[in-house]
Image (cartoon, grey):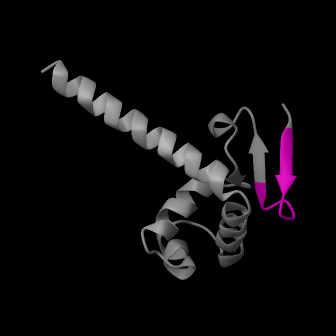
Amino acid sequence: MIATKTLDGLIIQNSQLHGGRPVIAGTGITVRTIAIMYKQGYNPEEITSELPLTLAQVYAALTYYHLHTSEIEADIQADSEEVLIQAYNQNMNV
């Protein structure tokens, strides 16, 4: 099990957790979850009221997101496309 620590250990990546997606250490909450909430209009303080995180953890996730935007956005887009395909397939089987 190889884990990579970034941003002073606040963000980690482990190939055996969440498909290797970067997560906030000790929480299991992915950076992409924070990125999605941020893009939906949540500010960091609102994110901490919705999730059991500190402001430092949220800002670390947002920093990671801004440093790796294309990677995180591609992951979000891939999942969005997969959801659409699954919904289409379910409708075709009705």
Picture layout, residue 13 above or below residue 57: above
- The residue segment tinted magenta is 3-11
Going 51% across and 69% down the picture, which residue do you hit? 38
Residue 53: in magenta span: no
Picture layout, residue 38 above or below residue 94: below
In the foreground, 42 or 84: 84
Does the image show residue 29? no
Picture layout, residue 35 above or below residue 18: below
Going 46% across and 75% down the picture, which residue do you hit? 42
Residue 7: in magenta span: yes
In the foreground, 31 or 69: 69
Write down the quadrant of residue 90 in the picture: top left
Going 17% across and 21% down the picture, which residue do you hit? 92
Where, quadrant-wise, is the C terminus in this rendering? top left
Residue 23 location, x and y as percent? 68, 52
Residue 69 location, x and y as percent? 65, 58
Which residue lies most toward the top here?
A: 93
Which residue lies most toward the front here?
A: 70
Residue 81 location, x and y as percent? 41, 38
- In screen coordinates, is 28 left or right of 93? right
Does the image show residue 10? yes
Residue 79 location, x and y as percent? 47, 40
